[in-house]
Amino acid sequence: MTEQHSVFDATKYKNAQREQWNKDGAAWRRWNPTLDRWYGEVTRQMLDLARIEPGQRILDVAAGAGEPAVSAAQRVGPSGHVLATDISEGIIALALQFARERGLGQVETRVMDGENVDLADASRDAVLCRLGLMYMPHPATALREWRRVLRAGGRVAVVVFSTPERNPWGAVPISIIRRRAQLPPPVPGQPGPFSLGGPGVLEGLMRQAGFSDPEVRTVPVPLNMASAAEYLRLAREAFGAFNAMMSHLSPEECESAWDEVEVAMRDFESPGRFDVPGECLVGAATK
């Protein structure tokens, strides 16, 4: 395990992330209505904890196809400004399109690495990152960068998934795919959906980065859909990491793995409904 962790290549990993989201970003955007329902409450709580007000200048890191940048832009109003950034040029272009469709001229987009923020010191009132920090190889570095660009008294607000046990929507498929693809378990410090979900981890990172008074809330994020089959369509189209884990398998092996995932996820199905638990942590702190 130590040897595997020592050869983790952050640059190669980031390039793979960029390629994945360039490929899968359009599918993520197509599922926006489902994703917005799924993450709606945790997004509202994040914006509340960030204390976003009209006229503020906001940085959204790992903005994806446009949320929470669009929601933040609605709060800051036309006198404010939201810079939405992502490592993927493909998906951030969709974010700009999403903002313009809603008439939000106060949203600007830029391709940017969340661990290396090309902005002036003390130039933003708040920094947001919804479901991105846990995929960064050096989360403490990222948080220190975000603190640097915040004005004194500015706020950071972050959403991550909690533990696998509280998120069977992802943990069950990942377990099946990992076994089918014969992948080793993740090593300590390796990025992934549940890498920052343990007790005290997010708060500790915020303190390590120099933030004051971190607060971490637990927020249920159940996924409610029509059926396990509909969930499988979402997972296959929008969860690029699942496909990436199986990239070395044959098409037949991939189909077999997906079939097993669908059978397992039927445990969360009832007549006319599919309800699978999920849980996020919302962390916020002050510069």
Image (cartoon, grey):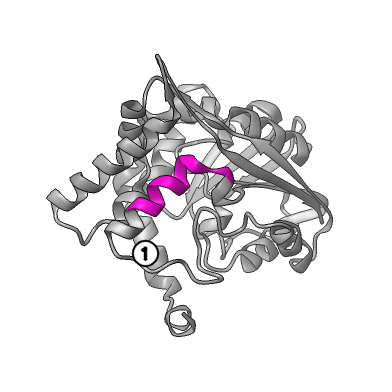
Residue 70, image quadrant: top right
> Is 223 rendered above or below residue 124?
above
Q: Please check the rendered image and state whether residue 169 is part of the magenta-colored stretch, yes or no.
A: yes
Residue at 38 percent of width and 35 percent of height: 265
- Toward the viewer: 9 or 254? 254
Which span is picked out in magenta? Answer: 166-176
Residue at 33 percent of width and 59 percent of height: 179
Q: Please check the rendered image and state whether residue 188 is part of the magenta-colored stretch, yes or no.
A: no
Residue 279 position, x and y percent, is 61, 40
In the rendered structure, the answer to whether residue 252 lies left or right of residue 199 reads: left
User: What residue is pinned by disc 1?
Assistant: 15
Residue 89 position, x and y percent, is 38, 50
User: For the stretch drawn in magenta, what is the main secondary structure?
Assistant: helix
Q: Quadrant of the C terminus?
A: bottom right
Amino acid type, residue under disc 1 in the picture: Asn
- Toward the viewer: 117 or 235? 235
